Amino acid sequence: FLIFNPASTAFAAFTHEAHYHLDSIRQNSLGAFCFYPGVLRDERPCTSNQLRIILDTHINNALGSGLSIAYYSTEDGAILGGTGWADWKTTTSPVAVCLSGAINDLPNAFVSTCRFSAGDDDLEDSHGVHVPECAMNLPQQRLTDGCY
């Protein structure tokens, strides 16, 4: 894992497929980039209050986005956009990315996770940039992008 640096620039868009271990980001038949978790994982409680609030917002669609992948301001929890959001020059606070997806080979198995964003097409975490990260094995309450 990489060390999180709040002063670092946060690029935040998915422009092509990304893979890390068994997880992937791929475009579905509708053209939306979707998160495909490879396995059900141990839930990771949020150690960051910011991420706890943002994950709760993401799962419960408190802001009404319905996007399975969304970027949020860590300053106020506001949604910044979906997979095409790349307007990192307008934010001075770190950016969180939340991803929710269904595990294809397990019925009713879902993963929702939030973490700090490290850059475009950012799924790999071989250097720890996503610490802290929190995850729950829950789907979102409302989904509009057709990802699952």
Image (spheres, grey):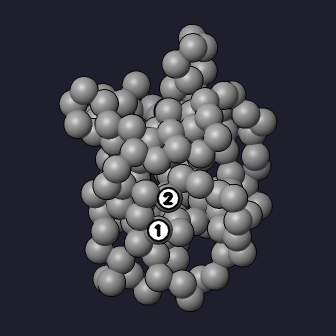
Above or below: residue 38 compared with residue 51 = above
Name the amino acid type tagged 2: Asp
Q: Residues within 10 Å of mark 2 (few under 14, many from 20)?
A: many
Q: Quadrant of the N terminus?
A: bottom right
Q: Residue placed at 38% from the left, 81% from the top? A: 91
Residue 39's place in the image compared with 70, above or below, is above
Q: Residues within 10 Å of mark 1 (few under 14, many from 20)?
A: some
The residue tagged 2 is 122
Circles 1, 2 touching at the beta carbon (< 8 Å)? yes
Coordinates of residue 60 in the picture (x, y in percent)? 48, 41
Relative to 101, 66 lies left or right: left
Q: Is residue 51 visible?
A: no
User: Element type at marker 1?
Assistant: loop
Helix, strand or loop under label 2: loop
Q: Position of residue 18 (x, y in %)?
A: 46, 47
Looking at the figure, which quarter contains the C terminus?
top left
Question: Which residue does the image show at 54% across and 53% down from the upper left?
Answer: 123
Residue 17 or residue 45, whichever sits in front: 17
Q: Nearer the viewer, residue 142 or 42?
A: 42
Residue kind at label 1, given as amino acid type: Gly
Give the residue pinned by disc 1: 119
What whole-number distance in Å separates the C-alpha atoms at marks 1 and 2? Answer: 5 Å
Residue at 65%, 68% in the rendered image: 129
What label does residue 2 carry, if any? none
Q: Can residue 38 be seen in this snapshot? A: yes
